[in-house]
Image (tube, helix red, strand yellow):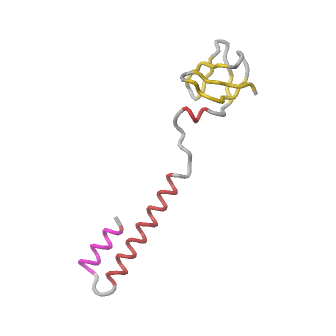
Amino acid sequence: MAFFVGVLLAVFVVDGPWEWVVVAAGAAIELGEAGFWWRWTHRHVPAVGVETLLGRVVEVDRDGWARVAGERWRVSGGAPGEQVRIVAVDGLTLVVEPL
């Protein structure tokens, strides 16, 4: 948007060599803004998908299920009442290992 405004200013308002300065300033602002927003959006790893479950510590209930992030998952590899770490997700089953 800044580049577009710079071009419009250069065409309709500014005369002489200042046209290039205005266009260059608009382009610089546009590149700086694009770089800022790229860094802003890439500073955190997305927190979606089953990959976010890996490494979490949960407790297996007496039915062989565990509650993770508000959802109940079937557990493979853990005894009831045991604290376990999630190492993989196989379909709708959590593969866990004891701590």
Query: In the image, is residue 9 part of the stretch drawn in magenta?
Result: yes
Is 73 within the magenta? no
The relative height of residue 22 versus residue 49 in the rendered view (above or below) is below
75 relative to 1, above or below: above
Quarter of the image that includes the C terminus: top right
Farthest residue in the left direction?
Answer: 12
Q: Position of residue 59 (x, y in %)?
A: 68, 23
93 to the left or right of 96: left
Q: In the orientation shown, which residue stands out farthest toward the right?
A: 99
Location of residue 50 by image quarter: top right
As drawn, the residue found furthest toward the bottom would be 16
Task: Answer left or right for 3 relative to 85.
Answer: left
Could you say which is closer to the camera, residue 2 or residue 96?
A: 96
x and y, in percent, of residue 79 in the image: 72, 16
Left/right placement of residue 10 relative to residue 94 reads: left
* Nearer to us in this view, 58 or 92: 92
Quadrant occupied by the N terminus:
bottom left
> Closer to the camera, 90 or 67?
90
Farthest top residue in view: 63
Look at 63% across and 21% down and name the residue there: 66
The number of numbered badges drawn on the structure is: 0
Q: Position of residue 31 (x, y in %)?
A: 43, 66
Q: Residue visible at 61% across and 24% down?
A: 94
Where 68 falls versus 16 (above or below)?
A: above
Judged by its main secondary structure, the magenta piece is helix
Point out the stretch of residues depicted in magenta. 3-13
Q: Residue at x 62, y 17 (%)?
A: 65
Vertical comparison of 58 with 15: above or below: above
Q: Quadrant of residue 76?
A: top right
Q: Residue 21 placed where, x, y %?
A: 37, 81
